[in-house]
Image (cartoon, rainbow, N blue to C red):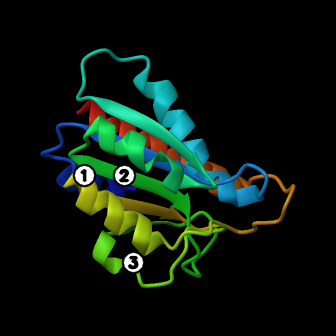
Amino acid sequence: MLKLKKVLRNRLSEARRVAILGIGSDLRADDAAGMLSAAAIQSKLSKIKKRIPVKIFFGETAPENLTGDIKRFKPSHIVIVDSLDARKRAGSIYLFKPEEIAEGTSFSTHKMPAKILVDYLTASCGCQTTIIGIQPKTLDFGGSVTPAVSRAASNVADVLFGVIRG
């Protein structure tokens, strides 16, 4: 968590407006990680008044449908949170820069290649983009979120909230 906090603090240090895009499906077990993190951050942010403008976007399984809303918000920084399979231990949290996303890589169970979405948002918003991945254990339809992924989603929310709050 210390590394995540340090990197996010560095990447968001000049943030003027932050868009947080949670991606995932609560119908596919650990695929819900990004949505869980986004909901937790939104809840925490609602309790504080003085902060930089932050808007939470719930992309679910079609985050590309929110690109217009995100552009209208005019973020200086975008943080995308989703379950991403990096063949690590379930619940592992890792960061990507847009240039680290390979062609053809998809956000967990979603159709649009991650690189296309990230490149489009970065170029059209003129913002800095950070991707936080949470390693899923299972993406079984109708399954529950595993404890390791639930903890990871909560930890991501806590760290992001702490960094945004200052």
Q: Mark 3 points at which residue?
A: 101
Does residue 104 appear left or right of residue 149 in this picture? left
Q: Earlier in the sequence, mark 1 or mark 2?
A: 2
Q: Name the residue under label 1.
A: 125
- Amino acid type, mark 3: Ile
Q: In which quarter of the image is the N terminus?
A: bottom left
| Along the viewing direction, whichever of 61 and 10 lies nearer the viewer | 61
Residue 25 image point, x, y percent: 69, 53
- Amino acid type, mark 1: Cys
| Along the viewing direction, whichever of 109 and 66 lies nearer the viewer | 66
Q: Can residue 148 be seen in this view?
A: no
Does residue 6 appear left or right of residue 32 in this picture? left
Residue 54 image point, x, y percent: 33, 33
Q: Do the residues labelled 2 and 3 touch (CB within 8 Å)?
A: no
Disc on res. 79: 2
Disc on res. 12: none
Q: What element carries label 3?
A: loop
Q: Residue 101's image quarter? A: bottom left
Q: Alpha carbon of mark 3 to alpha carbon of mark 1: how far?
A: 18 Å
Above or below: residue 48 compared with residue 81: above
Q: Is mark 2 on a helix, strand or loop?
A: strand
Does residue 128 appear left or right of residue 101 in this picture? left
Q: Residue at 23% across / 33% down in the picture?
A: 166
Q: Residue 68's image quarter? A: top left
Q: Alpha carbon of mark 2 to alpha carbon of mark 3: how far?
A: 14 Å
